[in-house]
Image (cartoon, rainbow, N blue to C red):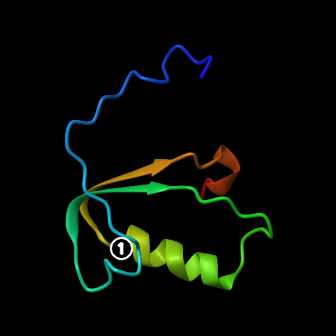
Amino acid sequence: KENEFFNALQVKFSYAITCHKSQGGQWNTVFIEQPYLPDGIDRDYIRWLYTAITRAKDKLYLIGFKDDCFINV
């Protein structure tokens, strides 16, 4: 909590559901936080991430993902 920006974002109202609960639905804006992966990336994680990403209609925010998660094509 030494980070001066820790409380910079204030959320007045928030609603959250799990990725699996969201299956079949879509939302205008989706936030996905990188989970803790002690065993690394596996097939189940990729399927989970695909499901989470495809719930967004307009905006998708990826939180806590390291730059090496993205490749330049």
Q: Is residue 6 left or right of residue 65?
A: left
Q: Secondary structure at mark 1?
A: loop
- The extreme right residue here reads 39
Q: What is the crowding at mark 1: few (fewer than 14 residues within 10 Å), some, or many (at least 20)? A: some
Say which of 40 and 4 sits in front: 4
Q: Is residue 8 left or right of residue 72?
A: left
Find residue 42 and report its image quarter.
bottom right
Pointer 1 residue: 54
**5 relative to 21, above or below:** above
Find residue 15 and report its image quarter.
bottom left
Q: Is residue 16 left or right of residue 36?
A: left
Q: Residue at x 34, y 80 (%)?
A: 21
x and y percent of residue 54 in the render? 35, 73
For the N terminus, which image quadrant?
Answer: top right
- The extreme top residue here reads 4
Q: Residue at x 77, y 68 (%)?
A: 40
x and y percent of residue 46 in the render? 59, 77
Q: Residue at x 61, y 53 (%)?
A: 72
**35 relative to 63, above or below:** below
**10 relative to 62, above or below:** above
Label 1 sits on what residue type?
Answer: Thr
x and y percent of residue 4 in the render? 53, 13
x and y percent of residue 47 in the render? 54, 82
Q: Residue at x 65, y 56 (%)?
A: 69
